[in-house]
Amino acid sequence: MSGYSFLFILVLLLLTSAFFSAAEIALTASKKTKLQVLLDKGEPRAVKVMALKEQPGTFFTVVQIGVNAVAVLGGVLGESFLNGYLADLLRPLADPTLAQRLASVGSFLIITIAFIQFADLIPKRLAMVNPERVAIGIADPMLVCVRALRPLVYLFNGLANLFLRLFKLPTHSIELITSEDIAAMVGAGAEAGVLRKQELHLIENVFELESRTVASVMTYRDEVVYFTIAEDERSIRQKITESPHSKYLVCREDIDNVLGYVDSKDLLQRIASEDLSSVIRSLDRLYAKKLLVIPDTLNLSEALARFKEARDSFAVIINEYGMVVGVVTLNDIVGALMGNVVHPSDDDQIVRRDETSWLVDGVTPIEDVKKVLDIDELPGDGEYETIAGFMIYQLKRIPKKSEATEASGYKFEVVDIDNYKVDQLLVTRLNSSATSTTAPAQP
Protein backbone atom coordinates (compact mmCIF):
# COMPACT_ATOMS: atom_id res chain seq x y z
CA MET A 1 0.00 0.00 0.00
CA SER A 2 1.36 3.41 -0.96
CA GLY A 3 1.64 6.29 1.45
CA TYR A 4 -1.12 8.23 -0.34
CA SER A 5 -3.48 5.26 -0.15
CA PHE A 6 -2.74 4.92 3.57
CA LEU A 7 -3.44 8.59 4.22
CA PHE A 8 -6.65 8.51 2.16
CA ILE A 9 -8.02 5.47 4.01
CA LEU A 10 -6.93 6.89 7.39
CA VAL A 11 -8.71 10.21 6.72
CA LEU A 12 -11.80 8.33 5.55
CA LEU A 13 -11.84 6.26 8.75
CA LEU A 14 -11.33 9.36 10.87
CA LEU A 15 -14.24 11.15 9.16
CA THR A 16 -16.49 8.11 9.58
CA SER A 17 -15.67 7.83 13.26
CA ALA A 18 -16.11 11.61 13.66
CA PHE A 19 -19.59 11.33 12.15
CA PHE A 20 -20.66 8.68 14.65
CA SER A 21 -19.12 10.59 17.58
CA ALA A 22 -20.88 13.83 16.62
CA ALA A 23 -24.14 11.95 16.06
CA GLU A 24 -23.94 10.38 19.51
CA ILE A 25 -23.47 13.70 21.32
CA ALA A 26 -25.91 15.66 19.15
CA LEU A 27 -28.76 13.17 19.54
CA THR A 28 -28.13 12.86 23.27
CA ALA A 29 -27.78 16.58 24.03
CA SER A 30 -30.55 17.89 21.78
CA LYS A 31 -33.68 18.93 23.69
CA LYS A 32 -37.20 18.12 22.60
CA THR A 33 -38.39 21.62 23.40
CA LYS A 34 -35.86 23.21 21.05
CA LEU A 35 -36.54 20.59 18.37
CA GLN A 36 -40.24 21.42 18.62
CA VAL A 37 -39.43 25.10 18.10
CA LEU A 38 -37.43 24.22 14.97
CA LEU A 39 -40.32 22.08 13.74
CA ASP A 40 -42.74 24.97 14.26
CA LYS A 41 -40.40 27.16 12.22
CA GLY A 42 -40.67 24.76 9.27
CA GLU A 43 -37.80 22.29 9.78
CA PRO A 44 -39.30 18.87 8.89
CA ARG A 45 -36.14 16.93 9.81
CA ALA A 46 -36.76 17.78 13.46
CA VAL A 47 -39.42 15.04 13.42
CA LYS A 48 -36.78 12.49 12.39
CA VAL A 49 -34.49 13.56 15.21
CA MET A 50 -37.32 13.22 17.75
CA ALA A 51 -38.12 9.77 16.33
CA LEU A 52 -34.49 8.71 16.84
CA LYS A 53 -34.57 10.08 20.41
CA GLU A 54 -37.65 7.95 21.12
CA GLN A 55 -35.48 4.85 20.55
CA PRO A 56 -32.12 5.71 22.12
CA GLY A 57 -31.04 2.09 22.29
CA THR A 58 -31.23 1.82 18.51
CA PHE A 59 -29.03 4.76 17.56
CA PHE A 60 -26.60 4.07 20.43
CA THR A 61 -26.17 0.55 19.07
CA VAL A 62 -25.54 1.87 15.56
CA VAL A 63 -23.03 4.39 16.91
CA GLN A 64 -21.14 1.75 18.88
CA ILE A 65 -21.06 -0.62 15.93
CA GLY A 66 -19.70 2.15 13.70
CA VAL A 67 -17.15 3.50 16.19
CA ASN A 68 -15.78 0.09 17.15
CA ALA A 69 -15.66 -1.19 13.57
CA VAL A 70 -13.74 1.89 12.44
CA ALA A 71 -11.37 1.65 15.44
CA VAL A 72 -10.58 -1.98 14.61
CA LEU A 73 -9.94 -1.10 10.96
CA GLY A 74 -7.70 1.77 12.05
CA GLY A 75 -5.69 -0.57 14.26
CA VAL A 76 -5.32 -3.08 11.44
CA LEU A 77 -4.28 -0.30 9.06
CA GLY A 78 -1.66 1.00 11.49
CA GLU A 79 -0.31 -2.47 12.11
CA SER A 80 -0.08 -3.35 8.41
CA PHE A 81 1.42 -0.14 7.03
CA LEU A 82 2.55 2.31 9.67
CA ASN A 83 4.32 -0.35 11.73
CA GLY A 84 6.46 -1.46 8.80
CA TYR A 85 7.14 2.13 7.70
CA LEU A 86 8.36 3.16 11.14
CA ALA A 87 10.45 0.00 11.49
CA ASP A 88 12.29 0.82 8.25
CA LEU A 89 13.05 4.31 9.58
CA LEU A 90 14.37 3.04 12.92
CA ARG A 91 16.51 0.09 11.76
CA PRO A 92 19.56 2.26 10.89
CA LEU A 93 19.35 3.81 14.36
CA ALA A 94 18.74 0.76 16.59
CA ASP A 95 18.86 -3.00 16.87
CA PRO A 96 16.29 -4.65 14.50
CA THR A 97 14.37 -6.22 17.41
CA LEU A 98 14.27 -2.94 19.33
CA ALA A 99 13.37 -1.05 16.17
CA GLN A 100 10.40 -3.39 15.60
CA ARG A 101 9.18 -2.88 19.17
CA LEU A 102 9.53 0.88 18.96
CA ALA A 103 7.70 0.87 15.62
CA SER A 104 4.79 -1.10 17.14
CA VAL A 105 4.53 1.34 20.05
CA GLY A 106 4.85 4.33 17.74
CA SER A 107 2.19 3.15 15.28
CA PHE A 108 -0.17 2.42 18.20
CA LEU A 109 0.37 5.90 19.67
CA ILE A 110 -0.04 7.69 16.32
CA ILE A 111 -3.31 5.89 15.43
CA THR A 112 -4.66 6.24 18.98
CA ILE A 113 -3.87 9.96 19.24
CA ALA A 114 -5.30 10.63 15.77
CA PHE A 115 -8.58 8.88 16.60
CA ILE A 116 -8.90 10.45 20.06
CA GLN A 117 -8.27 13.96 18.79
CA PHE A 118 -9.88 14.06 15.35
CA ALA A 119 -12.49 11.30 15.59
CA ASP A 120 -13.69 11.83 19.15
CA LEU A 121 -12.83 15.05 21.04
CA ILE A 122 -13.11 17.66 18.28
CA PRO A 123 -16.35 16.30 16.70
CA LYS A 124 -18.03 15.99 20.11
CA ARG A 125 -17.05 19.50 21.18
CA LEU A 126 -18.33 20.91 17.89
CA ALA A 127 -21.59 18.97 18.28
CA MET A 128 -22.09 20.34 21.78
CA VAL A 129 -22.06 23.93 20.50
CA ASN A 130 -25.43 23.50 18.75
CA PRO A 131 -26.65 19.92 19.22
CA GLU A 132 -30.09 20.48 17.68
CA ARG A 133 -28.68 21.75 14.38
CA VAL A 134 -26.06 19.00 14.22
CA ALA A 135 -28.70 16.37 15.01
CA ILE A 136 -30.88 17.66 12.18
CA GLY A 137 -27.90 17.50 9.81
CA ILE A 138 -27.05 13.88 10.63
CA ALA A 139 -30.64 12.62 10.93
CA ASP A 140 -30.96 11.27 7.37
CA PRO A 141 -27.54 9.52 7.25
CA MET A 142 -28.19 8.03 10.69
CA LEU A 143 -31.55 6.65 9.58
CA VAL A 144 -29.81 5.05 6.59
CA CYS A 145 -27.29 3.42 8.95
CA VAL A 146 -30.12 2.23 11.20
CA ARG A 147 -31.84 0.52 8.27
CA ALA A 148 -28.61 -0.97 6.91
CA LEU A 149 -27.55 -2.37 10.28
CA ARG A 150 -31.03 -3.41 11.44
CA PRO A 151 -30.15 -7.13 11.85
CA LEU A 152 -27.11 -6.33 13.99
CA VAL A 153 -29.06 -3.69 15.91
CA TYR A 154 -31.80 -6.22 16.64
CA LEU A 155 -29.23 -8.77 17.85
CA PHE A 156 -27.23 -6.44 20.08
CA ASN A 157 -30.32 -4.66 21.45
CA GLY A 158 -31.92 -7.99 22.27
CA LEU A 159 -28.86 -9.13 24.19
CA ALA A 160 -28.58 -5.78 26.03
CA ASN A 161 -32.28 -5.78 26.98
CA LEU A 162 -32.00 -9.36 28.19
CA PHE A 163 -29.07 -8.44 30.41
CA LEU A 164 -30.85 -5.36 31.82
CA ARG A 165 -34.05 -7.27 32.55
CA LEU A 166 -32.05 -10.03 34.18
CA PHE A 167 -30.75 -7.51 36.73
CA LYS A 168 -34.12 -5.63 36.85
CA LEU A 169 -32.64 -2.45 35.40
CA PRO A 170 -34.66 0.08 33.32
CA THR A 171 -34.42 -0.32 29.56
CA HIS A 172 -35.79 3.11 28.60
CA SER A 173 -35.21 6.59 30.00
CA ILE A 174 -38.12 8.77 31.07
CA GLU A 175 -37.54 12.42 30.29
CA LEU A 176 -39.21 14.50 32.99
CA ILE A 177 -39.01 18.27 33.24
CA THR A 178 -39.26 19.47 36.82
CA SER A 179 -39.63 22.97 38.20
CA GLU A 180 -35.98 22.76 39.31
CA ASP A 181 -34.95 22.10 35.68
CA ILE A 182 -36.92 25.10 34.46
CA ALA A 183 -35.52 27.28 37.25
CA ALA A 184 -31.99 26.23 36.31
CA MET A 185 -32.63 27.07 32.65
CA VAL A 186 -34.13 30.42 33.61
CA GLY A 187 -31.15 31.17 35.84
CA ALA A 188 -28.78 30.33 33.00
CA GLY A 189 -30.79 32.59 30.70
CA ALA A 190 -30.52 35.45 33.19
CA GLU A 191 -26.75 35.00 33.47
CA ALA A 192 -26.48 35.02 29.67
CA GLY A 193 -28.47 38.25 29.50
CA VAL A 194 -31.47 36.70 27.73
CA LEU A 195 -33.78 37.51 30.65
CA ARG A 196 -33.94 40.73 32.60
CA LYS A 197 -33.76 40.71 36.38
CA GLN A 198 -37.47 41.52 36.75
CA GLU A 199 -38.43 38.68 34.42
CA LEU A 200 -36.26 36.27 36.41
CA HIS A 201 -37.92 37.27 39.68
CA LEU A 202 -41.37 36.90 38.13
CA ILE A 203 -40.67 33.35 36.94
CA GLU A 204 -39.20 32.40 40.31
CA ASN A 205 -42.30 33.75 42.06
CA VAL A 206 -44.58 31.66 39.83
CA PHE A 207 -43.00 28.47 41.17
CA GLU A 208 -43.34 29.75 44.73
CA LEU A 209 -47.14 29.84 44.37
CA GLU A 210 -47.14 26.10 45.10
CA SER A 211 -44.78 26.27 48.07
CA ARG A 212 -46.10 29.35 49.90
CA THR A 213 -49.28 29.15 51.97
CA VAL A 214 -51.95 31.80 51.81
CA ALA A 215 -51.09 32.78 55.38
CA SER A 216 -47.75 34.14 54.16
CA VAL A 217 -49.43 37.02 52.28
CA MET A 218 -52.57 37.61 54.35
CA THR A 219 -53.36 40.59 56.54
CA TYR A 220 -53.12 39.20 60.06
CA ARG A 221 -56.04 39.13 62.45
CA ASP A 222 -54.65 41.90 64.67
CA GLU A 223 -54.30 44.23 61.68
CA VAL A 224 -57.73 43.63 60.15
CA VAL A 225 -60.03 46.66 60.31
CA TYR A 226 -63.67 45.61 60.77
CA PHE A 227 -67.03 47.03 61.79
CA THR A 228 -69.62 45.58 64.14
CA ILE A 229 -73.33 46.03 63.62
CA ALA A 230 -73.61 47.75 67.02
CA GLU A 231 -70.89 50.27 66.23
CA ASP A 232 -71.81 53.95 66.16
CA GLU A 233 -71.26 56.24 63.20
CA ARG A 234 -68.45 58.19 64.81
CA SER A 235 -66.37 55.07 65.36
CA ILE A 236 -67.02 53.87 61.80
CA ARG A 237 -66.01 57.21 60.31
CA GLN A 238 -62.85 57.25 62.43
CA LYS A 239 -61.85 53.77 61.22
CA ILE A 240 -62.44 54.73 57.60
CA THR A 241 -60.39 57.89 58.03
CA GLU A 242 -57.48 56.27 59.87
CA SER A 243 -57.41 53.01 57.88
CA PRO A 244 -58.69 53.52 54.35
CA HIS A 245 -59.30 50.22 52.56
CA SER A 246 -61.34 49.10 49.59
CA LYS A 247 -63.21 46.49 51.65
CA TYR A 248 -64.13 46.11 55.32
CA LEU A 249 -65.32 43.09 57.25
CA VAL A 250 -68.62 43.46 59.09
CA CYS A 251 -69.03 41.30 62.20
CA ARG A 252 -71.73 40.74 64.78
CA GLU A 253 -69.79 41.17 68.04
CA ASP A 254 -66.16 40.40 67.20
CA ILE A 255 -64.01 39.30 64.31
CA ASP A 256 -64.83 35.60 64.82
CA ASN A 257 -68.52 36.31 64.07
CA VAL A 258 -68.23 37.56 60.50
CA LEU A 259 -71.42 38.50 58.65
CA GLY A 260 -69.87 39.65 55.41
CA TYR A 261 -67.97 42.56 53.99
CA VAL A 262 -68.78 45.91 52.48
CA ASP A 263 -67.11 47.82 49.65
CA SER A 264 -65.92 51.35 50.25
CA LYS A 265 -67.74 52.48 47.12
CA ASP A 266 -71.02 51.16 48.54
CA LEU A 267 -70.39 53.10 51.75
CA LEU A 268 -69.69 56.28 49.83
CA GLN A 269 -72.91 55.92 47.86
CA ARG A 270 -74.93 55.56 51.06
CA ILE A 271 -73.19 58.12 53.25
CA ALA A 272 -74.86 61.05 51.50
CA SER A 273 -78.37 59.65 51.86
CA GLU A 274 -78.41 57.51 54.98
CA ASP A 275 -76.98 57.27 58.45
CA LEU A 276 -73.72 55.32 58.13
CA SER A 277 -74.28 53.19 61.22
CA SER A 278 -77.68 52.08 59.91
CA VAL A 279 -76.02 50.91 56.72
CA ILE A 280 -73.70 48.69 58.74
CA ARG A 281 -76.51 47.35 60.94
CA SER A 282 -78.55 46.39 57.91
CA LEU A 283 -75.61 44.82 56.11
CA ASP A 284 -76.82 41.25 56.54
CA ARG A 285 -80.12 42.23 54.84
CA LEU A 286 -79.12 44.75 52.20
CA TYR A 287 -75.49 45.26 51.41
CA ALA A 288 -73.62 42.13 52.38
CA LYS A 289 -71.46 40.51 49.72
CA LYS A 290 -71.18 36.76 49.50
CA LEU A 291 -68.22 36.04 51.75
CA LEU A 292 -65.50 33.69 50.54
CA VAL A 293 -64.00 31.68 53.39
CA ILE A 294 -60.83 29.64 52.84
CA PRO A 295 -58.68 27.54 55.21
CA ASP A 296 -55.20 28.69 56.19
CA THR A 297 -53.68 25.47 54.82
CA LEU A 298 -54.16 26.42 51.15
CA ASN A 299 -51.16 27.44 49.11
CA LEU A 300 -51.22 30.53 46.90
CA SER A 301 -52.01 28.57 43.77
CA GLU A 302 -55.00 26.89 45.42
CA ALA A 303 -56.20 30.21 46.84
CA LEU A 304 -55.95 31.76 43.39
CA ALA A 305 -58.13 28.94 42.03
CA ARG A 306 -60.72 29.57 44.76
CA PHE A 307 -60.85 33.25 43.84
CA LYS A 308 -61.42 32.27 40.22
CA GLU A 309 -64.20 29.82 41.12
CA ALA A 310 -65.96 32.32 43.39
CA ARG A 311 -65.35 35.24 41.01
CA ASP A 312 -64.35 37.28 44.00
CA SER A 313 -61.22 39.12 45.12
CA PHE A 314 -61.60 39.13 48.91
CA ALA A 315 -61.58 36.22 51.37
CA VAL A 316 -61.52 35.50 55.07
CA ILE A 317 -58.98 32.92 56.26
CA ILE A 318 -59.89 30.60 59.11
CA ASN A 319 -57.94 27.94 60.99
CA GLU A 320 -58.96 24.43 61.98
CA TYR A 321 -60.75 25.77 65.06
CA GLY A 322 -62.99 28.04 63.01
CA MET A 323 -61.25 31.21 64.19
CA VAL A 324 -60.48 34.05 61.79
CA VAL A 325 -56.71 34.36 61.38
CA GLY A 326 -56.69 37.03 58.71
CA VAL A 327 -57.98 38.27 55.36
CA VAL A 328 -56.48 38.04 51.90
CA THR A 329 -57.24 39.75 48.62
CA LEU A 330 -56.45 38.94 45.04
CA ASN A 331 -54.04 41.88 45.05
CA ASP A 332 -52.10 40.23 47.89
CA ILE A 333 -51.49 37.16 45.74
CA VAL A 334 -50.68 39.25 42.67
CA GLY A 335 -48.27 41.23 44.81
CA ALA A 336 -46.54 38.01 45.89
CA LEU A 337 -46.31 36.98 42.24
CA MET A 338 -45.11 40.28 40.84
CA GLY A 339 -43.05 41.38 43.84
CA ASN A 340 -42.30 45.08 43.70
CA VAL A 341 -42.53 45.19 39.90
CA VAL A 342 -46.09 46.54 39.84
CA HIS A 343 -46.73 46.98 43.56
CA PRO A 344 -43.82 49.00 44.95
CA SER A 345 -44.00 49.31 48.70
CA ASP A 346 -43.42 52.57 50.51
CA ASP A 347 -42.99 50.71 53.77
CA ASP A 348 -40.61 47.87 52.97
CA GLN A 349 -40.59 44.96 55.38
CA ILE A 350 -36.89 44.37 54.75
CA VAL A 351 -34.60 47.42 54.92
CA ARG A 352 -30.90 47.09 54.23
CA ARG A 353 -28.79 49.05 56.73
CA ASP A 354 -25.36 48.34 55.23
CA GLU A 355 -23.51 45.63 53.34
CA THR A 356 -23.94 43.02 56.06
CA SER A 357 -27.12 43.85 58.00
CA TRP A 358 -30.87 44.22 57.46
CA LEU A 359 -33.84 45.37 59.58
CA VAL A 360 -36.74 42.94 59.11
CA ASP A 361 -40.34 43.20 60.30
CA GLY A 362 -41.43 40.21 62.36
CA VAL A 363 -44.40 39.49 60.06
CA THR A 364 -42.23 39.31 56.93
CA PRO A 365 -42.85 36.03 55.07
CA ILE A 366 -39.90 33.70 55.52
CA GLU A 367 -39.70 33.07 51.76
CA ASP A 368 -39.10 36.80 51.18
CA VAL A 369 -36.35 36.79 53.81
CA LYS A 370 -34.66 33.77 52.23
CA LYS A 371 -34.81 35.38 48.80
CA VAL A 372 -33.31 38.70 49.93
CA LEU A 373 -30.56 37.01 51.96
CA ASP A 374 -29.94 34.36 49.29
CA ILE A 375 -30.56 31.49 51.72
CA ASP A 376 -31.54 28.13 50.25
CA GLU A 377 -32.81 26.53 53.44
CA LEU A 378 -33.41 27.38 57.08
CA PRO A 379 -33.89 24.94 59.98
CA GLY A 380 -37.47 23.70 60.23
CA ASP A 381 -38.59 24.94 56.82
CA GLY A 382 -42.34 24.44 56.55
CA GLU A 383 -42.96 24.76 60.29
CA TYR A 384 -43.51 28.54 60.20
CA GLU A 385 -44.58 31.28 57.81
CA THR A 386 -42.81 34.40 59.06
CA ILE A 387 -39.40 35.41 60.38
CA ALA A 388 -41.01 35.77 63.83
CA GLY A 389 -42.17 32.16 63.57
CA PHE A 390 -38.60 31.15 62.70
CA MET A 391 -37.33 32.80 65.89
CA ILE A 392 -39.96 31.02 67.99
CA TYR A 393 -39.04 27.71 66.31
CA GLN A 394 -35.35 28.26 67.02
CA LEU A 395 -35.70 29.39 70.63
CA LYS A 396 -38.61 27.02 71.44
CA ARG A 397 -40.37 29.86 73.29
CA ILE A 398 -41.55 33.44 72.83
CA PRO A 399 -38.41 35.52 72.20
CA LYS A 400 -37.34 38.40 74.40
CA LYS A 401 -35.68 41.60 73.31
CA SER A 402 -31.99 41.22 72.29
CA GLU A 403 -32.21 37.40 72.08
CA ALA A 404 -30.56 35.96 69.00
CA THR A 405 -29.91 32.80 67.07
CA GLU A 406 -27.55 31.90 64.22
CA ALA A 407 -28.41 29.91 61.11
CA SER A 408 -27.17 29.57 57.53
CA GLY A 409 -24.37 32.06 58.03
CA TYR A 410 -26.56 34.80 59.54
CA LYS A 411 -27.33 36.10 63.01
CA PHE A 412 -31.00 36.85 63.74
CA GLU A 413 -31.49 39.21 66.71
CA VAL A 414 -34.76 40.51 68.17
CA VAL A 415 -34.61 44.29 68.52
CA ASP A 416 -38.23 45.12 69.30
CA ILE A 417 -41.04 43.27 71.12
CA ASP A 418 -44.64 44.48 71.32
CA ASN A 419 -46.63 42.55 73.94
CA TYR A 420 -45.11 39.11 73.13
CA LYS A 421 -45.16 39.92 69.41
CA VAL A 422 -41.81 39.99 67.61
CA ASP A 423 -42.01 43.38 65.96
CA GLN A 424 -38.58 43.79 64.38
CA LEU A 425 -35.33 41.87 63.96
CA LEU A 426 -31.78 42.72 63.00
CA VAL A 427 -30.25 40.21 60.60
CA THR A 428 -26.46 40.30 60.26
CA ARG A 429 -24.25 38.30 57.94
CA LEU A 430 -21.56 36.51 59.91
CA ASN A 431 -17.93 36.96 58.99
CA SER A 432 -17.35 33.22 58.85
CA SER A 433 -18.52 31.26 55.83
CA ALA A 434 -20.17 28.60 57.94
CA THR A 435 -23.62 27.67 56.83
CA SER A 436 -24.54 25.17 59.49
CA THR A 437 -27.02 25.98 62.21
CA THR A 438 -25.64 26.78 65.62
CA ALA A 439 -27.28 26.73 69.00
CA PRO A 440 -29.45 29.74 69.89
CA ALA A 441 -27.43 32.58 71.39
CA GLN A 442 -28.57 33.87 74.74
CA PRO A 443 -28.49 37.54 75.72
Image: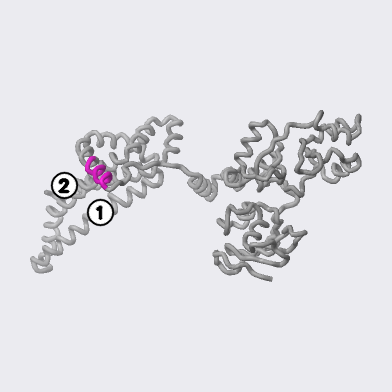
Q: Nearer the viewer, mark 1 or mark 2?
A: 1
Task: Look at mark 2 in the image and give the residue it sits on.
Answer: 5
Tell me residue 135's x, y (percent): 36, 39
- In this orientation, which residue lies closer to the viewer: 83 or 423? 423
| Residue 203 versus residue 350 in the image, above or below | above
| Residue 15 appears in the rendering | no
Residue type at mark 2? Answer: Ser
Q: Quadrant of residue 377?
A: bottom right
Q: Residue at x 46, y 42 (%)?
A: 177
Q: Is residue 229 magenta?
A: no
Q: Main SS type for the magenta part?
A: helix
Q: Are marks 1 and 2 in contact (CB under 8 Å)?
A: no
Residue 162 shown in magenta: yes
How much space separates mark 1 and mark 2, taking CA atoms?
17 Å
Q: Please tell me the numbered disc located at residue 114.
A: 1
Graded by Cα atoms within 10 Å as few (under 14), some (14 to 19) or many (20 or more), the crowding at tag 2 reads few
* Residue nearer the viewer, 119 or 154: 154
Q: Quadrant of the C terminus?
A: bottom right
The segment highlighted magenta reads 158-166
Left or right: 327, with 432 as reference point: right
- Quadrant of residue 62 in the image? top left
x, y percent for residue 81: 13, 53
